[in-house]
Amino acid sequence: LGVFGMIFISLGALLTSATIGLAIEAAYRVLLQPETKDYKTNCLLILSVYPIASTCSLLALAVP
């Protein structure tokens, strides 16, 4: 991969970890809110898809 590739992968892994951490914190805060079950379900679904999409985009950039 070379130096550029290693830096790129390291930075991507750091950003992916931060994204997953923020999604977990946001999901926890949604669960604490006094909202309806449907609202919480929809929020958690959205918050669970975003980190997966972030990881997939990182892998797509790392493949070439």
Image (cartoon, helix red, strand yellow):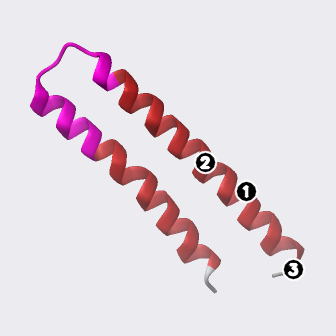
Label 2 Cα neighbours within 10 Å, binned few <14 / some 14-19 / many ≥20:
some
Labels 3 & 2 near each other (Cβ < 8 A): no
Is residue 23 shown left or right of residue 59?
left
> CA gap, disc 3 to disc 2?
23 Å
Rendering coords of residue 43 (x, y %)? 25, 36
> CA gap, disc 2 to disc 1?
10 Å
Most frequent secondary structure within the magenta stretch: helix
Say which residue label 2 marks.
17
Rendering coords of residue 59 (x, y %)? 56, 72
Q: Is residue 40 magenta?
A: yes
* Residue 2 - label: 3
Indicate the secondary structure of the residue bearing disc 2.
helix
- Which kind of residue does numbered mark 3 sit on? Gly
At x 45%, y 36%, the residue is: 24
Q: Is residue 1 magenta?
A: no
Please tell me in which quadrant of the rendered image residue 27 appears.
Answer: top left
**Mark in front: 2 vs 1:** 2
Say which residue label 1 marks.
11
